[in-house]
Image (cartoon, helix red, strand yellow):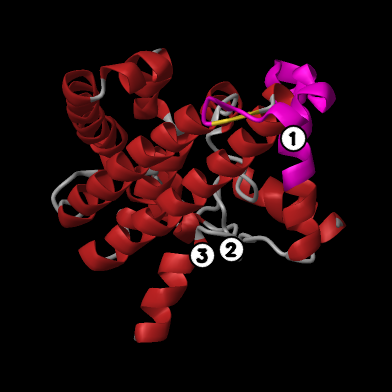
């Protein structure tokens, strides 16, 4: 059991890294990683919301109806995002201003909603909390790494502190949008090389793997949907 808990905790750091493997949360990843401070702040804010929302959604998984689960998840996530916003605005106003609109957009971050749907909705509170911590750490580390590369080599500063000997060699393009995409692509490639291209694969394309199966007439009648047939056909072709 300990090994299983540790696996859940560490999956999000590399093997199922939400940004570099699952390719989720790309918008805030590219937007806030021009500096180390903003990158770490966004990562920690997302981690807090992810852990809290996973715990609540897991605790209520047998109460929330399948027909309204997505709106319910969004309401829960929005509540925690609002709490984080108010805390930052009250105690860390500079960080609040730095993150700007991207702080509010945590509500629709695919990482949080995706983990709610794919993990917290199906697992215990403890496992869901561990999953949230692991995914949050993986997200934060990725943002830090991107922020480090873009700020240090693009602006010759570290967390706003000047690095004089790097000033003549700085590459300002790294702090721009094209530079962000370049660094992002390089990190994805490095992770793919390090993990030898291994990534989570869908084992079943049937209705039993679909979160909407409970409210689907075809699933209730035992008829596979067209989407499942198409995916099975594509896999067969490959």
**Pointer 3: what residue?**
11
Q: Which residue is mark 2?
A: 204
In the picture, measured across the screen, residue 175 lies left or right of residue 96, that is right
Percent across and percent down for residue 75 are 22, 29
Q: Quadrant of residue 34?
A: top right
Alpha-carbon distance for marks 1 and 2?
A: 34 Å
Horizontal side of 6 relative to 223 (left or right) equals left
Q: Secondary structure at mark 1?
A: helix
The residue that appears at 56% across and 31% down in the rendered structure is 29
Q: Nearer the viewer, residue 201 or 215?
A: 201
Q: What residue is rendered at 82% in x and 22% in y?
A: 168
Q: Do residues under tags 1 and 2 come within 8 Å of each other at their CB atoms?
A: no
Instruction: Inspect the magenta stretch and tell me whether residue 183 lies in it.
Output: yes
Work out whether mark 2 precedes mark 3 in sequence or the reverse, and give the earlier one. Answer: 3
Callout 3 environment at 10 Å: few (<14), some (14 to 19), or many (20+)? some
On the image, numbered disc 1 is attached to which residue? Answer: 183
Q: Which residues are magenta?
A: 159-187
SS at mark 3 in the image? helix
């Amino acid at each position: 059991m300990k090994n299983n808990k540790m696996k859940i905790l560490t999956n999000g750091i590399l093997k199922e890294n939400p940004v570099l493997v699952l390719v989720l949360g790309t918008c805030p990843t590219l937007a806030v990683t021009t500096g180390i401070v903003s990158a770490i702040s966004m990562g920690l804010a997302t981690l807090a919301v992810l852990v809290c929302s996973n715990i609540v959604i897991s605790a209520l998984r047998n109460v929330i109806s399948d027909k309204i689960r997505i709106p319910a998840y969004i309401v829960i996530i929005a509540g925690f995002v609002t709490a984080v916003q108010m805390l930052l605005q009250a105690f860390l106003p500079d960080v609040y201003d730095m993150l700007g609109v991207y702080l509010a957009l945590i509500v629709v971050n695919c990482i949080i909603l995706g983990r709610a749907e794919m993990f917290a909705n199906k697992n215990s509170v403890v496992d869901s909390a561990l999953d949230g911590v692991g995914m949050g750490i993986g997200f934060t580390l990725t943002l830090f790494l991107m922020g480090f590369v873009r700020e240090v080599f693009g602006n010759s500063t570290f967390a706003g502190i000047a690095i004089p000997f790097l000033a003549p060699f700085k590459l300002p393009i790294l702090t721009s949008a094209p530079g962000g995409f370049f660094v992002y692509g390089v990190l994805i490639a490095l992770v793919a090389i390090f993990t030898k291209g291994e990534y989570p694969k869908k084992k079943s394309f049937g209705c039993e793997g679909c979160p909407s199966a409970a409210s689907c007439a075809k699933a209730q009648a035992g008829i596979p949907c067209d989407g499942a047939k198409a995916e099975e056909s594509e896999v067969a072709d490959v």
